Image: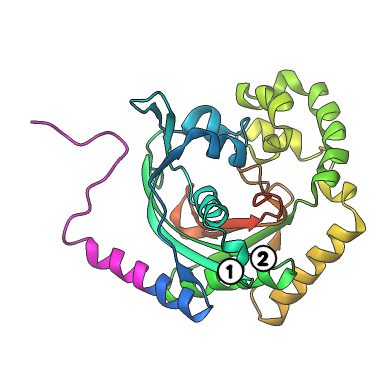
Amino acid sequence: MIKGIKGVKDLLPEETPRWRLIEETARRWAGRYGFHEIRIPIFEVTTLFARSIGASTDIVEKEMYTFPDRDGTSLTLRPEGTAGTVRAYIEHNRAAIPVPQKYFYFGPMFRHERPQAGRLRQFHQFGVESIGMADPRADVEVIALLWRILSDLNLPSLTLEINNLGYTADRDTYRPHLVSYLRQQESALCANCRHRIDANPLRVLDCKVPECRVITETAPRLGDSLSEAARSYFTQVLTGLDAIKIPYSLNHRLVRGLDYYNLTTFEVTATNLGAQNAVGAGGRYDQLVE
């Protein structure tokens, strides 16, 4: 008997009603917020993800399902939906249409991770992209949409964590301070974090290994290197969340695993789900379309 591949899951008839409920709830709220559905290919040229996600990220280095096409072109099963959506926006000259443009999508994504509870190699994602609005209100809107969907699904014990990654120049100012500190602690870091010191030092802050978390607790803070413009922008985001009464907590470790984020980054967890408790996450990107 041939069995299913490790890290993927069959959705049996008794499970599909729950999936439809989630999809229909997300679709309904996305429509109320003015988002329109887009459907993008399951695979793209590998270069798209390497350039957008970041060549030194764990996703690109370790987790992508990449294979050669018959003509030799390197193709990759999509590990996330933002890169493909932005590619479609550019390729079809959607910039000629008045902004903002707001899209949502459903579908399977693929990452070669160690299968465990809450982590599969084929996982399903609902995502939204708001393009063309350089305003903190766009960030607030996306977070509010996520919060409404999860609340409508009656997920208990929701927690929103949020951080300010600043602009590229802010991170360029901060990075040498962080690298200098990590070099002094290098021998006590896990193997992944030792590699990240050169490749992607901010990701060390997000490491879940207890010894690394102890070390980074006293590391220099990105917040100390932020420009006044970045601080002002983020303050407006928090003010917007306060105005619509969405509770949040600040988390300076929240850097996410994708290089294209700047300024606002966020994650919503359901604390009763155990270790793999993130149910939604995202952030702002201003340079990806360029």
Residue located at (12% from left, 31% from top): 2
| Nearer to us in this view, 20 or 65 | 65
Which is the main secondary structure of the residues drawn in magenta? loop
Q: Quadrant of residue 102?
A: bottom right
43 relative position to 230: left or right: left
| Mark 2 touches mark 1? (CB < 8 Å) | yes
Q: Which residues are magenta?
A: 1-24
Residue located at (84% from left, 29% from top): 181
Q: Position of residue 90 (x, y in %)?
A: 57, 54
Which of the labelled discs sits on residue 132, or is there none?
2
Q: Is residue 19 magenta?
A: yes
| Callout 1 amino acid | Gln
4 relative position to 54: left or right: left
Structural distance between the alpha carbons of marks 2 and 1 = 7 Å
Which of the labelled discs sits on residue 44, or is there none?
none
User: Can I make out residue 106 in this image?
Assistant: yes
95 relative position to 173: left or right: left
| Nearer to us in this view, 101 or 141 | 101
Mark 1, secondary structure of its residue: strand
Instruction: Give the answer, above or below, for where 32 lies relative to 51.
Output: below
Q: Earlier in the sequence, mark 2 or mark 1?
A: 1
Residue at far top of view: 187
Residue located at (60% from left, 42% from top): 52
Which of the labelled discs sits on residue 101, or is there none?
1
